Each structure stands twice: as structure tokens, then as C-alpha cells.
Image (cartoon, grey):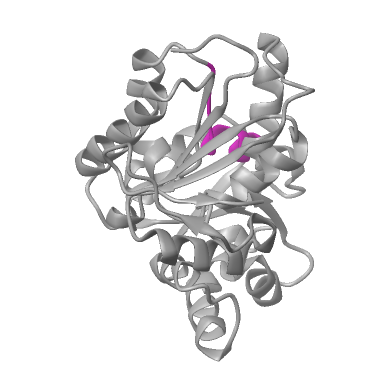
């Protein structure tokens, strides 16, 4: 375990969605080095059992800890739901995740108390958003499961007639519930905020779990006195899957991460370094 200010932040996701968290963290903490690990070989996590997700997630988080990170970010709603309690006991570094920050934000911004969350099957089954929002008096939660959203993002598709039709089907219960706030309860979903906002209309506020996680990471490191304001901002992107595909999809979704990829051989997972 590293306790030095100049050590990197470790960011973990099941695939590409956590790049939205990484991007937001880079915007807020440009001096920080980050190591991003996407478990793309076993993505998506959403249809998997909680026990399976827990096993995969802990293995990936262990890998980041072995690399000497000073903080961990679980940039995946499904993994956060499955592993958060274990991770807080297992790792003695600052740890942030995506669920509680997004839930708190949604409760604050809702005008009517009608909140919805769009998420994966595993996140819905876990009931983690019900627990997170249930403590807020007068808030009614509608949950919609949107499994194909991840499929579109993992293919680099963020628009088109097929995606629009799927979004209209998934989001119909949100419209019927008259929710005025929707939590994007998967870090893939902010990449589809255009089509989601189009379907729901301008009166529904979208809360990005990715953006709120970045805010929480900034606050956590500031409180700990571990912000590195003068660092070089080195960014390493690792994947358990195909490095070339990771670089291609990652740069298509978030172009500022560049399009150069180099596989690394010195760790047990397949990896990729993407220039920024």
C-alpha cells in the first residue's frame, strides 16, 4: 500500500463506462496520476450474479493495490453494489464509489420527490439504490433496467434509430412515473445522455453517477491531504481484454484519451497504455 501524495489513483470498472469517471477525475484533478483497469474480458457485469461480480471485482482491485495506488475508485455501479462493504474492510486507502454520491445528488435536486434510476440487472437486484434513497423522507424511486445500453456503448454506438427505439422502451416507465430526476446508474450511461435526454425531455434532470463519483473523489483526497497539485498527470489504461479494441472504443467514446495503444506484458492481466 502506498501512502505518498504522488502515488496514482486506481480506477476500476468492468469495461469502458468507467472512462467517464476517469475523464471527470482528470478534469478535477489534472495533476494526479491515474491507473485505470477495465475488466473488458468479462464485461458486462450486469447479467452476472452478485457473487461472481464480487470475485472478479476484488481480483481487479487487488491488482491495483499491488501497483501502489494511494486511493481506489470503484467506477462501476454493479461492482459497487456487490463489493463495497468488503472493499472498505479489505483496503486501507481512501475509497470512493458511484452509488451514494449519485443518490445524494438526486435527492437534493429533485423538485417533486419522484426519482428514477436506470441501471443494470445486478444493480437492480441488489436493491442498493432503494437502500441509498430509502432514508430520504418523501422520495419515491422508480427503477428501470437497461441492459442493452451497455451493449451499445461497448460497441461505440451513441446514436441512431435502433438505440432510440430501445431507449424509448426502457424509459417509458420513467415517463409514466412522472419522475423529474433520473440517476444514470451505470457509468456507461452518461455516454448516452443525448438520447436519454431526448426521450425524457428537458424537464427531467439527469444525474451522472460518474460526475458525482469524481466530485466525491476530489473531496475525499482533499480531506485526506493527498491531492497532488504539481504532478505530471500520467494516465495508464489497462484492460483484461483486447488492448487494440480497448484503445479503439475508448478513443471513439472519449477522444481526448488518444488512439495510441501498447500492450504491456509485465502483469497477469492483458493491458494497454493509451496516450493522452
Residue 133 makes an appearance in the image: no
- The front one of 155 and 262 is 262
Residue shown at 54% from the left, 9% from the top: 3
Q: Quadrant of residue 46?
A: bottom left
Residue 168 makes an appearance in the image: yes
- The front one of 3 and 234 is 234
Judge left or right: residue 208 versus residue 83: right
Residue 216 horizontal/vertical position (percent)? 66, 29
Q: In this picture, which residue range is highlighted in magenta?
A: 94-104
Residue 119 horizontal/vertical position (percent)? 46, 55
Residue 264 versus residue 146 in the image, above or below: above
Residue shown at 42% from the left, 66% from the top: 245
Number of marks in the image? 0
Magenta span contains residue 27 = no
Magenta span contains residue 97 = yes
Residue 8 versus residue 162 in the image, above or below: above
Q: Quadrant of residue 266?
A: top left
Quarter of the N terminus within the rendering: top left
Q: Quadrant of residue 40?
A: bottom left
- The front one of 263 and 147 is 263
Residue 219 horizontal/vertical position (percent)? 71, 22
Judge left or right: residue 258 versus residue 89: right
Residue shown at 64% from the left, 34% from the top: 104
Residue 91 versus residue 122 in the image, above or below: above
Amino acid at each position: 500500500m502506498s501512502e505518498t501524495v504522488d502515488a496514482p489513483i486506481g480506477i476500476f470498472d468492468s469495461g469502458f463506462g468507467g472512462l467517464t469517471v476517469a475523464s471527470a477525475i482528470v478534469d478535477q484533478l489534472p495533476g494526479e496520476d491515474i491507473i485505470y483497469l477495465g475488466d473488458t474480458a468479462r464485461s458486462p457485469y450486469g447479467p452476472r450474479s452478485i457473487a461472481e461480480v464480487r470475485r472478479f471485482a476484488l481480483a481487479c482491485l487487488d491488482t491495483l493495490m499491488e501497483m501502489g495506488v494511494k486511493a481506489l475508485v470503484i467506477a462501476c455501479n454493479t461492482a459497487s453494489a456487490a463489493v463495497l462493504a468488503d472493499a472498505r474492510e479489505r483496503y486501507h486507502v481512501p475509497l470512493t464509489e458511484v452509488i451514494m454520491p449519485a443518490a445524494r445528488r438526486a435527492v437534493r435536486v429533485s423538485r417533486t420527490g419522484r426519482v428514477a434510476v436506470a441501471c443494470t440487472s445486478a444493480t437492480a437486484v441488489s436493491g442498493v439504490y432503494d437502500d441509498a434513497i430509502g432514508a430520504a423522507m418523501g422520495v419515491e424511486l422508480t427503477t428501470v433496467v437497461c441492459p442493452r445500453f451497455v451493449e451499445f456503448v461497448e460497441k461505440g454506438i451513441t446514436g441512431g434509430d435502433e438505440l432510440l427505439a430501445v431507449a424509448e422502451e426502457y424509459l417509458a416507465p420513467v415517463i409514466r412515473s412522472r419522475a423529474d430526476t433520473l440517476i444514470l446508474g451505470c457509468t456507461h450511461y452518461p455516454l448516452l445522455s443525448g438520447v436519454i435526454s431526448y426521450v425524457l425531455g428537458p424537464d427531467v434532470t439527469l444525474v451522472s453517477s460518474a460526475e458525482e463519483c469524481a466530485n466525491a473523489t476530489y473531496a475525499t483526497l482533499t480531506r485526506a491531504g493527498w491531492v497532488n497539485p504539481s504532478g505530471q498527470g500520467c494516465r495508464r489504461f489497462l484492460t483484461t481484454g483486447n488492448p487494440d479494441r480497448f484503445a479503439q472504443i475508448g478513443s471513439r467514446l472519449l477522444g481526448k484519451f488518444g488512439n495510441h495503444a501498447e500492450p504491456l506484458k509485465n502483469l497477469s492481466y492483458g493491458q494497454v497504455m493509451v496516450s493522452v
